[in-house]
Amino acid sequence: MFGAIQERGCTRRKSPARSSCPPGKCLERMEHQRRRPEHEVEDQRVSFRIRSAGATAAVLAFGIMTCATMAGIPEPSFVLHGTLAVDGQTIKATDGVTILARVDGVAEPVGTYQMGDNPAARDNYVLRIRLESLADGSGQSGNAAVVGQTAHIMIDQGVGPQRHAADVELTAGGAVVTLDLSVRGGITWHRAVYYDERYPSVWTSGTWMLDHLVRQGYTVLDADVLKAWMIARIADNQPSVVVFVQDAVPDTVAETMTPDCTLRQYLNAGGKVVWYADIPLFYQGHVDGTTTGWGVEGSMEVLGFNAAGGDWESGTEVSITGGGLNWGLTRTWLSQRPAEHAGLRALAHDGYGDTAAWVMHYVEGDTYRGFVRFFDRWGRPNGHDVRQLAVFGNQLPPPLDNDYDGDEDVDARDLVLFDRCFDGPEATPTPPWAGITVHNCLATFDSDEDADVDLADFAGMQNTFTGSDF
Ligand SMILES: [Ca+2]
Ligand SMILES: [Ca+2]
Ligand SMILES: [Ca+2]
């Protein structure tokens, strides 16, 4: 019967209902109508006698659909309900968290519930997943699932990416299923670090950052494996990030100075790169340790803009923006190669307002991936901040007290930095080394938070001393 209606509907594209009945609204009404078996349809060419006004609207809605976009027939919803916990915290009606259901191949969520929408549900969620059945030749309507599909239940906390909570098979229309949801750990990132001793570096040296990231569970990719890994991530679309601890881009992923190269294709597919030290794509590195100088054209061609278009060598201490704080930056540095480009998400500015840390997104609407650039100078960036930028979308614990380099220990190296920051009571630290900022001295070592680094803080340093490799 409904199939016949749809066929006739295909001839009625100029239905007056077009402007008065948004498709989503119609579907809700149609779903409602499905629970009223008494309606009937009379065989007339352009109008149907139906007892329910809601069903009339539904039929008129069919009238605006072309044969090519003909959608399914609404079924009773699949209902999920239960409690929600995020990182061990029970989510309450007042927390503003939204639960969504998505199915593959359907653009819109097939169900949405914001905690508190239904006061009677109190601290439970009640997620109604719209279902439809498909007549021969009809496609899904774009905001409903069909029986047998798997719904991906996502949690949207309003910041960062949505988090995957469960997969639920939609077994039957009208089913009511209790499911207590719990999400932990946020995004499951593939975390990797690019390092290849055959290939060159420019402003980076040594293996300190490599060793740190490996201890934190990052996978080491040499130049060849890096390419295979990026291609695999483009194919499987799983969340992934690679930190470059060498700052000449290997010719395995930047094969050409064009946006066709693997690196850019990886970014276009939702990949994430964290880059520090010298200008991104300034040098292409080769397996024999040599480089090809691309200059800033490397970034202009591959990334689509000049990654160092600001004033060079300012040497000014950066100020972290609100966005940078949100992304997890805790430590400053003296900027050398900032960008100046309007399309960037600015994480830090140098003293002249140029952008010393930034993110360029390559997926429309993206908020947490893309090309992440910070610490635009030679030297050693903070390990904690590197890791937090890499997994932004997830929140790492704050840096350890007295861990100057952010490598999750308080050891002899940190003690050396303490010494450089130490200027006694009621004195602003005056670190003698370029690259040690007053901000970092106080943020790291001022245990009693009285704006100095003195013997009282040294007691705190001793108490937290761990030695290396913790
Ligand atoms: Ca340390
Ligand atoms: Ca102090
Ligand atoms: Ca250490």
Image (cartoon, grey):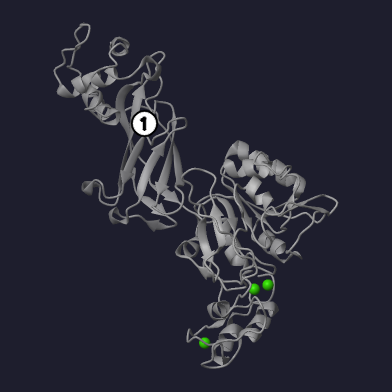
Task: Residue lying at the far left in this picture: please name it.
Answer: 51
Position of residue 357 measured from the top left corner of the image (x, y, whole percent): 56, 62
Left or right placement of residue 454 versus residue 54 in this view: right
Q: Secondary structure at mark 1?
A: loop
Q: Disc 1 designates what residue?
A: 143
Q: Is residue 43 above or below residue 132?
A: above
Residue in the picture at 61% in, 88% down:
422
Question: In which quadrant of the rendered image does the C terminus lie?
Answer: bottom right
Residue in the picture at 39% in, 35% down:
108
Give the total of numbered labels. 1
Q: Is residue 207 above or below residue 112?
A: below
Which of the 4 quarters of the picture holds residue 73?
Answer: top left
Please indicate, yes or no, whether residue 174 appears anywhere in the rendered image. Answer: no
Q: Amino acid at mark 1?
A: Asn
* Ligand 1 - quadrant of the structure image: bottom right
Left or right placement of residue 459 versus residue 110 in this view: right
Which of the 4 quarters of the picture holds residue 265?
Answer: top right
Question: In which quadrant of the rendered image does the N terminus lie?
Answer: top left
Work out whether residue 372 or residue 328 is closer to the camera in this orientation and state it: 372
- Mark 1, other Cα within 10 Å: few <14 / some 14–19 / many ≥20: many
Work out whether residue 126 or residue 247 is closer to the camera in this orientation and state it: 247
Position of residue 153 measured from the top left corner of the image (x, y, whole percent): 42, 41
Left or right placement of residue 2 versus residue 390 in this view: left
Residue in the picture at 13% in, 17% down:
51
Position of residue 257 measured from the top left corner of the image (x, y, whole percent): 70, 44
Left or right placement of residue 142 versus residue 233 in this view: left
Position of residue 20 measured from the top left corner of the image (x, y, whole percent): 21, 27
Q: Is residue 444 above or below residue 52?
A: below
